[in-house]
Amino acid sequence: MLAVGAAGGLVGAATAGRVTRRLGIGRSAVLGYTLFSAPLLLVPLAGGPTPVVLGLLFLAELGSCVGAMIADVSVSSLHAALIPDALRARVTGAYRTLTHGVRPLGALTAGALGTAIGLRPTLWIGTAGALLCLLWVLPSPVPHIGELPTPETEVVAGSAATDEARGKRGAGTDSEAESEAGGGLGTEAGPGRKARPETKAGPGDWTGAEAGVEPGVATEAMAPPEGEGLPRQKGRPEARPGAR
């Protein structure tokens, strides 16, 4: 019986992907829960000649293990898609505490019932309890989930957002990198601000940044009159031709 169950587990694991793609992740989970619980009805029904009893028990173990693997693949995929990475350990610990931690209580209860009312009635009660799990899943949103939901991307300031922005801009020049760091050429850009490129001006003309206007807008018409004493641009001739 245990060997047949192991073979059923391999069959369920091999077919879980195809079942999920055809039915959707939610319906696959419901199908897995159904196949896991429904074959258990054959256990209390097993009776009569030995070949009949063995055949029913083999079918029960085979079908239940197939359903268990389909349900595990579907539900585990939902957990991986919905639970944030920072909370995965806590949620998994709580989930396993609820699902595995109550098994000793179930074993003690089954032993007490088997002693009090007999083995076959206790098997019927256990099978009915397994089928009750569908009452929790069917009214929930799980059966309506077709594809795995996409988790929201948690962007850490200064890492993912910056890398993505730089990837869209492409490789820049040294002057652009200095401007982004706050030491741009020709402007007074703060940290994280990209300086606009200098305007094309003739020798001795003032740019928009030096004239106190928005960078990248200034033209030759914005050059100040001669003799007003405004600061001259670095690297340009000291005076306009013909003026002191």
Image: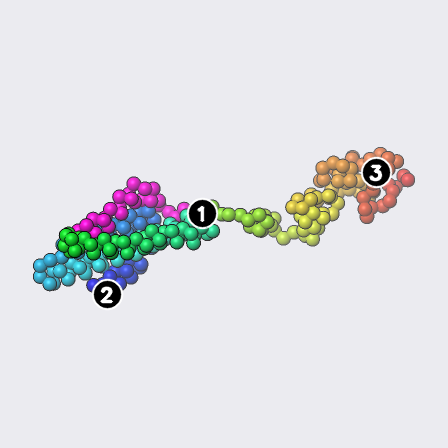
Point out residue 239 in the picture as x, y percentages from the top left corner: 87, 42
Q: Nearer the viewer, residue 172 or 126?
A: 126
Q: Is residue 15 visible?
A: no
Question: Is residue 57 in the magenta section?
Answer: no
Quarter of the picture holding the C terminus: top right
**Kind of residue sitting beneath label 3:** Leu
Which amino acid is tagged 1?
Pro
Please state the horizontal and vertical placement of residue 181, each as a whole percent of the image: 68, 49
Three-letter amino acid code at the position of disc 2: Ala
Vertical arrangement, residue 138 with respect to residue 174, above or below: above
Q: Secondary structure at mark 3?
A: loop
Coloring scheme used: rainbow
Q: Which residues are magenta?
A: 123-150
Secondary element under disc 1, as helix, strand or loop, is loop
x, y percent for residue 224: 82, 35
Q: How many marks?
A: 3
**Badge 3 is on which residue?**
230
Alpha-carbon span between mark 3 and mark 2: 92 Å
Would you name the residue on which mark 1 appears?
151
**Does the magenta stretch mainly form a helix, a strand or a loop?**
helix
Of residue 28 and residue 126, the one placed in the foreground of this image is 126
Kind of element beneath mark 2: helix
Report the residue marked by disc 2. Answer: 3
N-terminal label among 1 and 2:
2
